[in-house]
Image: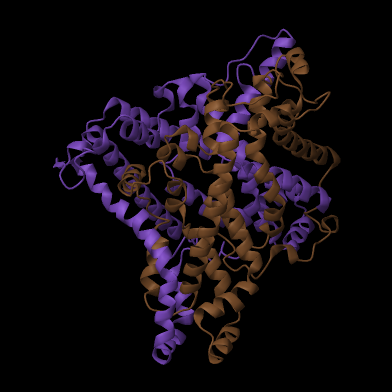
Chain colours: A purple, B brown
Amino acid sequence: MTTLDQPAVRPKGAEESRGSRSRKARRSRPRRNTALFWFLIPGLVVLLVFHYIPLLGNVIAFQDYQPYIGIMHSRWTGLDNFDVIFNGDEQFVHALVNTLELTLIQVIFVFPAPILLALAMNSLVSERIKKWVQNVLYLPHFLSWVVVVSLFQQMLGNDGMLNLFLNSHDAGSWNIIGNPDLFKTLLTSQVIWKDTGWGTILFLAALSRVDHNLYEAAAMDGASRLRQTWHVTLPALRGLVILLLILRLGDALSVGFEQIILQQGGVGLENSQVLDTYVYNNGLIGGQWGVSAAVGLVKGVVGVVLVLGANKIAHLFGEEGVYRS
Amino acid sequence: MTTLSPSRPVSRRPQRSYSAIPGETPGSPPWRALKSLILLACVVLVLLPFVAIISTSLADANQINKAGGYVLWPDSPSFTSYSALLSGGLVSKAMMVSVGVTVVGTTLSLGCSIMLAYGLSRPGSFGHKPVLMLLLMTMLFAPGVIPSYLMVKELHLINSYWSLILPSLINAFNVIVLRSFFMNLPGELIDAARVDGASEWTILRRIVLPLSKASVAVIGLFYAVTYWNAFFNALLYINDASKWPMQLVLRTYVVNNAALSGGQVNAAAGAPIPPAQSLQAAILVLSIVPIVIVYPFLQRHMNKGVMVGAVKG
């Protein structure tokens, strides 16, 4: 568990403890150390070819990129491609608004779900039942979005199980899949179904580390069970909640790309377009390479700023955050 | 996040009997009943779709027609849908592609990740710090869909199975986890081997790997699940339907509800093609089964430190 107090992304801290030893090691065993460099080569090549060189490929955001001419010969157009963002192109605005709306909905409904579930699981009497419940609830996390969307369609679709049941009881039918008004609700419930169980892992671990004397003391002071939860359990989760909110904030502009791309067909773009699907639909499908790359680039930069900013805020609150510089 | 120090498995903690501790008591009976009810509802909501899908895939045409579509329990279970899908045709091919990509991809990913993690776990080696930074930075910046697509296209990997493997070969998070496993191994062992003149390669193979079998296995399973589930790479890079992996077949024939025609499904001689519902259900089951098979293994090691994945999402 650790690292709720010991963040993962902290390269410097990790090095410090071994720094002095390593300097000595470098002096005494130069040959070995270069030998180790060869171990890094395959991974390094993959990182460069599929991560860092494409990162540079973002220059097409400043070009009128034409695939048949290539990056080298395409015309440079300065900031023209960014016009859709600055002038508020209608499609782009739809995508932006939908993205932010979904993020907001998900922070409100998806984020607390695992906390509540963890609280319910935490006080189960039997360890065996608890384990069993966990095993079942973790499973959906490992399924792909295609599988989850398929399952939802088979259950809730127009000729899915639910409507079959309603029809056979003369209760009419209920159009859920492919209904633009319910699209965001559908997306949210899918996320809840898939990841709530898995999300409890961290909270359960944090709960298991609460000092039990605190409960005892609270009970002695006459705190009811609810007040124990409020004054002991929830404060114990505070750091973790802040950490996870920060991570979520850093992802504010990415909402369920695969999930949406799979279900966009039936509901129309106005309700379902988000920034990621905007980039995909206009760039790869529509051929507007430059514009889409520009939107993708801005999205990426804003995302990084959000993570760094949120981390800063966490520090101001006296929390550990994701990393320390 | 968590557990970059995997040497402290959570599961080993002595299990307390909760009822003995104030504050962890389940509360008053109605409160308790409510909680159990909520959990029961969650379990049913998760399991019900699986039951329905498996039953429908096994049900015969008569029962499906009578029920109008789905069944919760097959009266006379038969495997006709499965044999129709798996005796050649689109779905059999897709299964082979998915299995192949998963096996080859996992092997290569694991190989590269182990080497990278080991190289980065021994401090002071040449190029250690910049490479570590490059690796960590990948978690912060993603290159974006369009530049990634252009890169794969430049390398002429469109419609090649390699496009499903190479771009996702290294997962920074997995490497960092492995690296911290390796860093927690007793340094004396490695130094002793060095004194005895073992090469780095020998040390990795004979000392480090045997000591971290469990963690390597978990990381391998995580890679395998990722490869099996990968959908977007295939959507981007594989246009040729005969090279589709399972996830794309699932999307076309289940999510988008395209009809499976005679060439794609081979019913036994003289028998009719099984009903669409049970074919769709069978495709779904086929794409879930491998996950369910590895799930117990994942489970066993989950507590050992790959809680990490929780945040990764």
The residue positioned 68% from the left and 41% from the top of the image is B289
Residue A191 appears in the figure: no
**x, y percentage for residue B39?**
75, 39
As displayed, is residue A244 above or below residue A86? below
Query: Left or right: where does residue A188 sit relative to residue B67?
Result: left
Picture quadrant of residue A286: top left
Counting labels gives 0
In this orientation, which residue lies closer to the viewer: A309 or B174?
B174
The foreground one among A208 and B91 is B91
| Percent position of residue B169, x then y | 46, 55
Residue A137 percent location from the top left of the image:
70, 43
Q: Is residue B266 above or below residue A57?
A: above
Left or right of B90? Residue A35 is left
Q: Is residue B224 above or below residue B64?
A: below
Q: Nearer the viewer, residue B2 or A178?
A: A178
Question: A100 or B185, which is in the foreground?
Answer: B185
Q: In the rendered view of the protein, which quadrant contains the N terminus of chain A?
A: bottom right
Q: In the displayed structure, does residue B11 sit left or right of residue A49?
A: right
* One can see residue A279 in this view: yes
Residue drawn at x 50%, y 72% is B118
Q: Where on the picture, by quarter, is residue B45?
A: top right
Image vertical order of residue A238 relative to residue A294, above or below: below
Q: Position of residue B76 (x, y in %)?
A: 83, 24
